[in-house]
Image: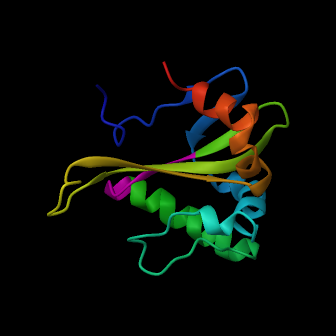
Amino acid sequence: MTNVYENCPVFESDRYLLRFVDEDDSDDLLRVYSDKNALPFFNSDNCDGDNFYYPIRAKMEKAIAFWRQSYITGWFVRWTIIDKTISQAIGSIEMFHRCADDDFNHACVLRLDLRSDYEKSRTDSGYSCFVSSFCL
């Protein structure tokens, strides 16, 4: 298996594209991370107090710069989720290897942040379609 920090893979289904986060994603991701309805679903544990609420473009750009730097240092990788039907970023996925002195040592942690209109679809085929698009 290829080291994700040496070659960040791109994942694609009929509807969604996951690719390494880019500075050009700031406008679309601002819609995600300034969405107070989506905020309660963002997992911010072990994030030094960051709650992932970015109400202005400058904060979103700073977060993206941090995410990109974190990839370079091997802390985590963050992909932007593009809904190809609307050609917009609708969220992001973060993944990292967790090292800790507990039962979850050496676990892979996956964090999924979506716009609230996609969170609401967890109970319908929209969310299931997203998840199943990438499962074998």
Q: Is residue 14 left or right of residue 4?
A: right
Q: Is residue 76 left or right of residue 61?
A: left
User: Where 75 falls versus 123 (above or below)?
Assistant: below
Per the rendered image, the range of residues in magenta is 72-79
Residue 84 visible? The answer is yes
Does the magenta run of residues contain 73? yes
Residue found at the very far left of the displayed protein:
101
Q: Residue at x 75, y 66 (%)?
A: 37
Q: Residue at x 47, y 81 (%)?
A: 49
The quarter holding residue 34 reads bottom right
Q: Is residue 86 left or right of residue 114?
A: right
Does the magenta run of residues contain 52? no
> Residue 125: x percent and y percent?
74, 31
Q: Residue at x 39, y 54 (%)?
A: 76
Residue found at the very far front of the displayed protein:
123
User: Where 114 falls versus 58 (above or below)?
Assistant: above
> Residue 83: x percent and y percent?
75, 36
> Residue 79: x percent and y percent?
55, 45
User: Where 77 falls versus 63 (above or below)?
Assistant: above
> Residue 111: x percent and y percent?
49, 52
Residue found at the very far bottom of the displayed protein:
49
Residue found at the very far right of the displayed protein:
86
Q: Nearer the viewer, residue 99 or 118?
A: 118
Q: Nearer the viewer, residue 112 or 77?
A: 112
Residue 83 visible? The answer is no
